Amino acid sequence: MSTDQTKYLFYQRIIDFFWKHDIWTIAGGPNWEENYKFICETSYSMCQGVTIYANMVNDEAVPMKVLEHYAQNAVLYRTQLYVKDYFHTEEIRSRLIDPGMIDNKVAIWVGIWD
């Protein structure tokens, strides 16, 4: 997954829309069919973006918070802790994550051509 693929869904109006309407996952998960229908009825461009993303992840559920955290790191070009309310806070940078200090299992998303 490239940063461009994630950035499309990482706009303030889209993130705010998802949180406002309790849409917690993309491409599967709880209430996905109803949420997808609602998204498509609300915004054609948002529907296109979500459809493309769902196809890229083979309709596997992706929590919004995971996608948002990945996008924050991609946009800022740094691996940092998740910033809650990213678009509504003055400080969008948080503590860097040092991969060498992680003791538990982690999952890392890598771009298609990385």
Image: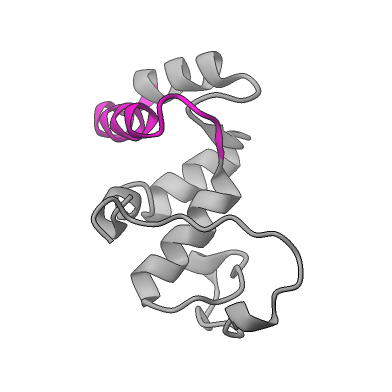
Q: Nearer the viewer, residue 73 or 87?
A: 73
Above or below, comparing residue 81 to residue 65 in the picture: below
Above or below, comparing residue 57 to residue 3 in the picture: above
Write down the quadrant of residue 42 in the picture: top left
Q: Which residue is drawn at 37% across and 18% down?
A: 41
Name the quadrant of the C terminus: bottom left
Residue 75, given in percent of the width and then of the height, sits at 35, 69
- Residue stretch rendered in magenta on the structure: 42-62
Q: Residue at x 57, y 35 (%)?
A: 25
Residue 22, given in percent of the width and then of the height, sits at 63, 35
Above or below, comparing residue 105 to residue 36 in the picture: below
Q: Which residue is drawn at 55% across and 77% down?
A: 80
Residue 32, given in percent of the width and then of the height, sits at 55, 21
Q: Does the segment drawn in magenta span residue 81?
A: no
What main secondary structure does the magenta stretch of the protein show? Answer: helix
Report how many numbered discs are placed on residues in the image.
0
